[in-house]
Image (cartoon, rainbow, N blue to C red):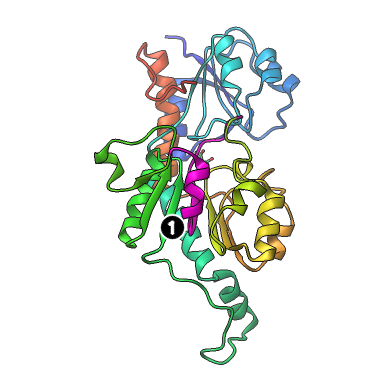
Amino acid sequence: MTKPKLLVARQLPKTPMKKIYDYFDVVDISQTEQTNEQMMKAAQGCHAILVGDRLDQPLIDALPESIKIASTMSVGFDHIDVAAANARGIIVCNTPSVLDNATAEIALLCMLGAARGVKYGQQQIEAGDWGQLGDSAPLGIDVIGKKIAIVGMGRIGRTFAKLCRGLSMEVHYHNRSKLSADLEHGAIYHASLAELLPHAQFLSIHAGLSAATKHMIDEKAIAVLPDGAVLINTSRGDLVVDDAVIAALKSGKLFAAGLDVFTNEPDINPEYTKLNNVFLLPHVGSATFETRDAMGNRAAENLIHYFDGKPPISVVKL
Ligand code: DGY
């Protein structure tokens, strides 16, 4: 039987990659430059694409009609113009649910790392300068028992809420719709972001990036946070306005921030790296062996299901 032809614009972990090579006739461009022209040439005769950094309108326009499905190894799909792909008859698949625990763990790490001034501590260790016991200021702030405000109570937001309940935090949230009581677990719903923010001693963002959510945490939003709030972002950098966050970190309006995601990764706003009241990670929310394998398997299975004549497991719906 002739194998379907797959354009591979990014590598998957070893096990799912083997599945891909067994099932497909692979055109691997993951290690080469990926201009629209190069991708268009490589994609001739392909039936599917394993998405790399982007699948935007100009690239979609350049791809041959033979491509019917695009699979991304991520839950986020802001690097894909799903509407344009669907209009061209291309189904887009992603990998939700398998990275909930890993991402919630990183949100927890960011929250604790920011609240307890881990960056200062690491600097002291590296400099061999601990100061006197008891005056190794600056001090952090307690987390246990405080209020956490979660923006976006999808699977990752709810998993993070569970961890916060373990810290006896009072969970507040804003979501497009109120959750049922069995998913809410006593969390307090706020119908708008504006209503949520004054409760946010800690604010953690778990919303997807879209035109509606871009820059949702701006100067105005930060102004209504309690003084000395802590911001945690493990979703997408463009959900916040960097200049507003940096100004608030400098003024003390924000006590600290724990950030795993940034605008324009990896060329992030350099001001972040000059601040001490931040805990920064290089977008590693899903970066565990188990989770990356599960994501890779899902990305591969989505494609294999389609060519086996079954519905892909996770199709992005707008
Ligand atoms: C995702 O899956 O969207 C994570 O942020 C990794 O990119």
Judge whether residue 109 can be spotted in this image: yes
Q: Is residue 285 visible?
A: no
Horizontal side of residue 18 vs 252, given as left or right: left
Q: Is mark 1 within 8 Å of ligand 1?
A: no
The residue nearer to you, when weighing 1 against 272, is 272
Residue at left 66%, top 59%?
248
Q: Going by the picture, which residue comes out furthest to the bottom?
A: 132
Q: Is 300 above or below relative to 254?
A: above
- Location of the N terminus by quadrant is top left
Find the residue positioned furthest to the top: 65
Question: Height in image: 13 above or below 301?
Answer: below
Q: Is residue 266 magenta?
A: no
Q: Tell me: residue 103, above or below residue 72.
A: below
Q: Residues within 10 Å of mark 1 (few under 14, many from 20)?
A: many
Q: Residue at x 62, y 62 (%)?
A: 253
Q: Secondary structure at mark 1?
A: helix
Q: How many marks?
A: 1
Residue 247 x, y percent position in the rendering? 71, 58
Residues shaded magenta: 191-211
Residue marked by disc 1: 108
Front-most of residues 288 and 225: 225
Q: Nearer the viewer, residue 83 or 315?
A: 83
